[in-house]
Every structure is written in C-alpha cells, then in structure tokens.
Image: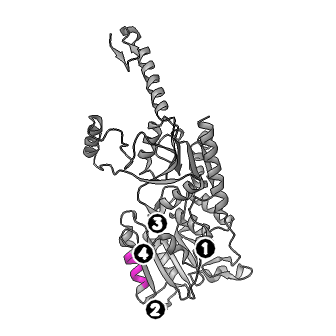
Amino acid sequence: MSTAFGLLPRLPACTRGVQRCYITAANKHLQTERHSSLLPETWILSDSNPNIDIRTAKVADALGLPVAIKHIVAQPKSPLGRSFAGLRSLFGASPAGRLRYVDDASTQRLPRFVIAGSNRALPGLLEVIKQTGGRSMSVFLGLPRTKLAQIGALVLSRLDQMRLRSLGPARANLDNAVSTLLPLSGLSTATAPISTLKPVVAVCIGTGFEAAGFQLLSSDVDRLAEGLLQLPPSHIRIVLDAEPYRGLRSTIESRLIRRLRERSVDTNGVEHPPMEIEVIDYAQAGQPPLTGVLASATHIIATADNIPIVSMAASLQRPVYIAGMERTADLLREYYYVLDTKNLVRRFYPLGSRYSYMVAPEINGTVDELSAIRDHEPWPHYDTQRDLDTVAAFIKDRYVELNS
C-alpha cells in the first residue's frame, strides 16, 4: 500500500479529496516546523535602487536587529524567458535549498524580518513568506502589486491611503497597515549641513507620470524654464530620474537645459543671460548620491509627480516648491492640498513670473521669491523620527501578534 510522506495510506477513490487535505496539512506542519527557529536578523531585499535602499535601511535599523542586504535575482523580461526559467525550476535545475528570487540565500536560514520597498523586490518577499509559512515578518513600503493580506505589515503614505479609500471603505481599514503623512524618506536633518554662500537650487524632475493625477507635459517644462529664468543668481542643479517616462528626457534637454544655458527672452520680453547649470542624470553611472545633492541645496524644486523627493526635502527641512502643482488632478490634487495646508510644500511661481505682479499686492508681509502667491512665513519642522518610531513599533507588535 503506497504512502504519502510515509504517513498516510492510499485511500479509495471516494476519499482521495480528504487525503489531499491531509497531505496539504502535513506539508504546512512540516514547513512550519522546519522554520520554527528564524535567524534573529532583518533582511533588506534590494533591487539596487539607492533611493529605495536608504528607506528600507532606515526601517531595518529601527527594528534593532543585525541587518543583511540581499539582492534580488533578475528575472527574464520576455514571456519565453520566464517560461524557460519556470521549467528549469520545476525540473530542479536551480540549486536545491536555495531561494529562487533572492541571491545567496538558503531556504534553511531565513530571517525574522524581511523588508522590500519596490515591486521589483516583491517576488523575493513573497518567496520568503511562503518558505517560512508566514512566520517571517514581511514588510512592504507602499502598495504592492499583490493581495494586501499576504503582507505582514504595509507602510503607507497618506496618498496610498487615499488610493485605497477610493476603492471602498473596507480597503482603507487594514489591520496590517500603518500610515504616515509623507512616505518614509530615510533622511533626517542630522545628515543635512548647508555651507554655501551662493543659493543652490536643486530642480528634481521625476519620471514624468503619477497615476494619482499628473503627467508632465512639454508645456509644464516650458513653464518650469520660465520660472527658473526669474530666480536671483543661483547655482542650479537639474536632477533627472533614472527611468523617465517615454520622450521626457529629450524634452527636458531641448526645452529646459538648452534654453537655460543660452541667452533667452522670457514671456515678459525681458532678456536673460545664460545661467549656471549642472545636470545630474541618474541614468548615467558615476553620479553623486541623491542624499548629498539634496542636503547641499538651499531650495528644492520638484515636479508634481516626484513624491519621494517631496518627502526627502521635508525630512531635510528644506524649502520645497512644486512645479506643475496647479495642473494636478483627482487624488494627487487633494494630497497636495493637505500638504499645502500644513505649509510643507508651496507652488513654484517665482516673483517676476507672468502676472505675478497682480498677486503680490494682496500678500501681507514679505513675498516668498519662489512662490509669489505666498508670504515668506517660516517653514515647519516635519518630525521624521516620530514617523519612524511609529512604524517600527507597529511592525514589532505585528510580529508578536502573528507568532503568538
């Protein structure tokens, strides 16, 4: 009489459905028993994006355990390549006892906490969850492209919450989620000394698209160039994202960078000399760390799609101005309204821009030179450490809850 796992006899056909249930239960029991002792450490699943790694590293450090960085194994992009990789795994072509999506990781030595910050790292996170039977505390920063209940702890921003709420109240009230007003940045004012005699303005251009309600158009780039022409003498750094939306890079080069480097006339008919421009393109190797670029800036201008930069600037206590803020729509417009109400961001509309002379007389006090629709009130202190402490406490409580 054949057996399954040496435990269950082969039953008649009428009871094989029950047998399959017993085998599944036995599988789960053996899997949980095998991983009942997890390594007292935290894994960071890295997709080699330094701007995401700095966020996940900050959360990992806050958990108080030794940290190990594990890189995600790149998967084939073509359907044929993915099918071939799946067949290799099915027939045992990959080394036994190794994780498929996480480099240099054994199925027998898995961590107590595992953190991912991007959907590229999500397959590795789900693989660790499956291998440990859910005993490893999985943490994801943002909204993952999978069932939300599969993740042990979701770290969401207010915008993420707004996205969920738009799908229905039940989706917004999650037991496994903790939220902060801004996405966790991984930065603090302690990392941000400023030592410059000349203003340094970092103009951070994102991917060009935010599904919550904004796409950067050529007309937005023209308005950004017009605004930059009105700035007092400054050193301007144009910071380009590593993965811009299609066609955006050539638009930036032709309509922004080239125009600022040449003598040009603005829409008011005023002629401007060439400006001092430095271009930092993260699609190219050898660029300085983004944290250092932002920390050395006196002012930061971000396009409306670039939410991570807004979070980092607020964490560094830098004035942050939003280019294209007036053209945001739907959820993103509501989100920026919240941030503007708290004085964390201001619309980029420098003094000297077209029609700004009509707004200035209505403002009491000194006009903000980079946002002529606002007075120059002090910028608030955004407490990033409080956000981090709240997130770390929630993750630890969830771990105890799920393993009690």
Quick check: can you spot residue 117? no
Q: Which residue is mark 3?
A: 206
Element under disc 1:
loop
Reply above or below: 308 against 224: above
Reply above or below: 267 against 302: below
Element under disc 4:
strand
State which tag comes first along the sequence, 1 or 3: 3
State which tag comes first along the sequence, 4 or 2: 2
- Which residue shows up at 65% across the image and 55% down it? 389
Q: Nearer the viewer, residue 60 or 171?
A: 60
Marks 1/3 in contact by CB < 8 Å: the verdict is no
Where's residue 402, x and y in %?
Answer: 59, 37
- Residue 273 is tagged as 2
In the image, taking residue 389 as reference, residue 133 lies left or right, namely left
Q: Report how far apart the C-alphas of labels 1 and 2 lie in the structure.
A: 28 Å
Marks 1/2 in contact by CB < 8 Å: the verdict is no
Q: Which residues are magenta?
A: 253-260
Q: Report how far apart the C-alphas of labels 1 and 3 lie in the structure.
A: 18 Å
State which tag comes first along the sequence, 1 or 2: 2
Foreground mark, 1 or 3? Answer: 1
In the image, taking residue 120 as reference, residue 202 lies left or right, namely right
Q: Report how far apart the C-alphas of labels 4 and 3 lie in the structure.
A: 12 Å
Tell me the quadrant of the picture where the C terminus can be found: top right
Q: Which residue is mark 4?
A: 280
- Which residue shows up at 65% across the image and 66% down it? 340
State which tag comes first along the sequence, 4 or 3: 3
Count residues near mark 2 (Cα–Cα under 10 Å), then give few for <14, some for 14-19, many for 20+: few
